[in-house]
Image (cartoon, grey):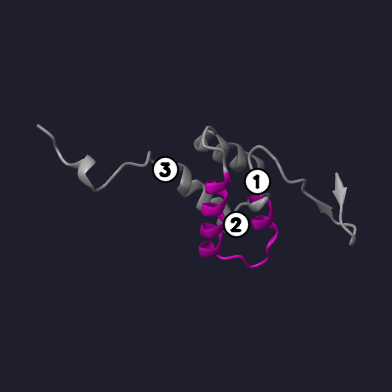
Amino acid sequence: MKWNLRGESTMMKGDAQDPKGLIYEAFRIDGITESECRSIFLDWALSLPIEQDTSTTIKALLEQYKVNVGHPMIEVMTQGLTTMAAPRRRGGWRSRPRN
């Protein structure tokens, strides 16, 4: 484990589930709002490698942070898990029916 100058433990970046340590830091911020958690969650999701299964990763993070009941990031991750869907095109010539 690494320690900072104040004697606090710090997370090493590069964790498979949290490459930038964003989720970890979100749980350390006192008074963080759900809106702020959503923004952090989006940044976290965009930082994952394309081949990594997001659902599996969210489940692992929820298991890791389950002791933080009531934290807004738990709610955001749970919503992310239940509302995730594969992206699809909504417009343009490719979405129009062809004969």
Provide the major secondary structure of the magenta segment.
helix
Q: What's the amino acid at mark 2?
A: His
Category of crowding for the residue at label 1, using alpha-carbon neighbours closer than 10 angstroms: few (below 14), some (14–19), many (at least 20): some
Is 98 covered by the magenta stretch? Answer: no
Counting residues from the start of the chain, the first of labels 2 and 3 encountered is 2
Report which quarter residue 57 is drawn in: top right
Q: Is residue 57 above or below residue 90?
A: above
Residue type (three-letter) at the residue carrying disc 1: Tyr
Of helix, strand and loop, which one carries label 2?
Answer: loop
State the quadrant of the C terminus.
top left
Q: Secondary structure at mark 3?
A: loop
Q: Position of residue 8 (x, y in %)?
A: 85, 56
Q: Amino acid at mark 3?
A: Met
Callout 1 secondary element: loop
How busy is the neighbourhood of tag 2: few (under 14 within 10 Å), some, or many (20 plus)? Answer: some
CB atoms at circles 1 and 2 under 8 Å apart? yes
**What's the magenta region?**
23-47
- The answer to which of 2 and 48 lies nearer the viewer is 48
Q: Which residue is mark 1?
A: 65
Q: Earlier in the sequence, mark 1 or mark 3?
A: 1
What residue is rendered at 66% in x and 37% in y?
Answer: 16
Say which residue label 2 marks.
71
Give me the disc on residue 2.
none
Q: CA distance from mark 2 to mark 3?
A: 20 Å
Residue that lies at the very extreme toward the bottom in this rendered image: 31
Q: Nearer the viewer, residue 83 or 41?
A: 41
